Image (spheres, rainbow, N blue to C red):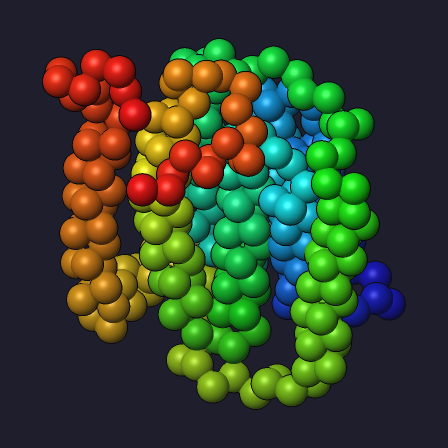
């Protein structure tokens, strides 16, 4: 007899996903791939929110995930806009070239 | 071991493998388009876990908004800019960067895992009002109804603020990416 799946397992899975995303964000130099790593970390957090909503029996966790998704969508739109306006002149720029953002 | 538990295990571990494999593909692929495909795999895995945790509405939104809209936006920008050439990952601009990044991210995972394991037995009481679960017979919309009741009563102010956020994001993006007629050189 094995135990049923606990919410803790989802929390651990979310922690691993967050770690992978953080590693990619620190290592990769392509700004678009770095952005995808931020999405990975956001998804780890949403997984944690839903797992804790289940564990605590509170629907507020799922409502928070809805807001996280809205903010993530807005963040992707603005971030990709910035990346497009920087990379338009020279494709192949890495994150080091973003020093041009300085006013 | 009952069949239901076995199925739960099967769903959990196959979705976990999807999530981890997709995440590793995102950071390990040389080609950004392949990274985007790995991201789709991860997002679908997270949607499967949402279904396993009875968050059906969030699973649908996850597939539509993330795997649909956001990844398509990533691919659109990749194709638009033509930056989809493969990068050589063996080049390491800063020597100590990768070991340091590995230490930092492993430390993060270990910290969170320690916190989860330490509080394993805490919070076993349910302080919340409980989550309605869609049942086989009768109430199929329990999850989405409870979610909407929470969203439009307790969090209605935040919900209205998100509309402001979306408008600001759209206007800001249009301003950012617009080519101004007098500024031909581009900054």
Quarter of the image holding residue A73?
top left
User: How many marks overall?
Assistant: 0
User: Residue placed at 44% from the left, 81% from the top?
Assistant: B128
Toward the right, the furthest residue is: A1
Image location (x, y in percent) of residue B79? 46, 13
Please tell me which residue is depicted at 56% across the width and 51% down the height of the picture.
A41
Query: Can residue A87 be seen by looking at this rendering?
Result: yes
Quadrant for the C terminus of chain A, please. Answer: top left
Compared across the picture, whether B68 is left or right of B107 comes to: left
Relative side of B23 to B56, left or right: right
Q: Report the residue that reaches farthest toward the left.
A: B182
Q: For the point 68% across and 48% down, which residue is it?
A: A23
**Which of the pair B68/B145 is nearer the observer?**
B68
The spot of residue B113 in percent (x, y) is 73, 69
**Quadrant of the rendered image containing residue A102:** top left
- Image quadrant where one finds the N terminus of chain A: bottom right
Q: In the visual, does B145 lie left or right of A39?
A: left
Residue at image location 78% in from the left, 58% down from the top: B103
Q: Is residue B117 left or right of residue A45?
A: right
Q: Nearer the viewer, residue B7 or A55?
A: A55
């Amino acid at each position: 007899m094995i135990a049923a799946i606990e919410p803790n397992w989802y929390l651990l899975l979310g922690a691993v996903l967050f770690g992978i995303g953080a590693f990619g964000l620190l290592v990769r130099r392509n700004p678009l791939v770095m952005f995808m790593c931020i999405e990975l970390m956001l998804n780890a957090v949403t997984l944690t929110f839903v797992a804790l909503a289940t564990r605590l029996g509170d629907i507020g966790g799922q409502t928070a995930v809805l807001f996280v998704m809205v903010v993530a969508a807005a963040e992707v739109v603005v971030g990709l806009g910035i990346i497009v306006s920087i990379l338009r002149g020279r494709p192949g720029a890495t994150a080091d070239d973003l020093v041009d953002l300085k006013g | 071991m009952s069949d239901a538990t076995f199925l739960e295990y099967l769903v959990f571990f196959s979705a976990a493998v999807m999530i981890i494999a997709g995440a590793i593909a995102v950071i390990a692929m040389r080609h950004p388009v392949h990274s985007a495909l790995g991201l789709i795999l991860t997002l679908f895995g997270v949607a499967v876990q949402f279904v396993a945790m009875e968050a059906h509405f969030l699973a649908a939104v996850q597939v539509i908004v993330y795997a649909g809209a956001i990844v398509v936006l990533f691919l659109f920008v990749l194709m638009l800019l033509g930056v989809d050439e493969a990068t050589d990952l063996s080049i390491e601009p800063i020597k100590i960067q990768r070991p340091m990044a590995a230490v930092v991210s492993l430390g993060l995972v270990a910290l969170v895992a320690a916190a989860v394991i330490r509080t394993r037995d805490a919070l076993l009481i349910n302080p919340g009002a409980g989550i309605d679960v869609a049942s086989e017979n009768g109430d199929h919309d329990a999850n989405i109804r409870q979610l909407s009741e929470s969203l439009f009563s307790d969090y209605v102010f935040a919900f209205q603020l998100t509309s402001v956020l979306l408008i600001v994001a759209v206007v800001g993006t249009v301003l950012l990416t617009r080519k101004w007629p007098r500024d031909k050189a581009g900054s």
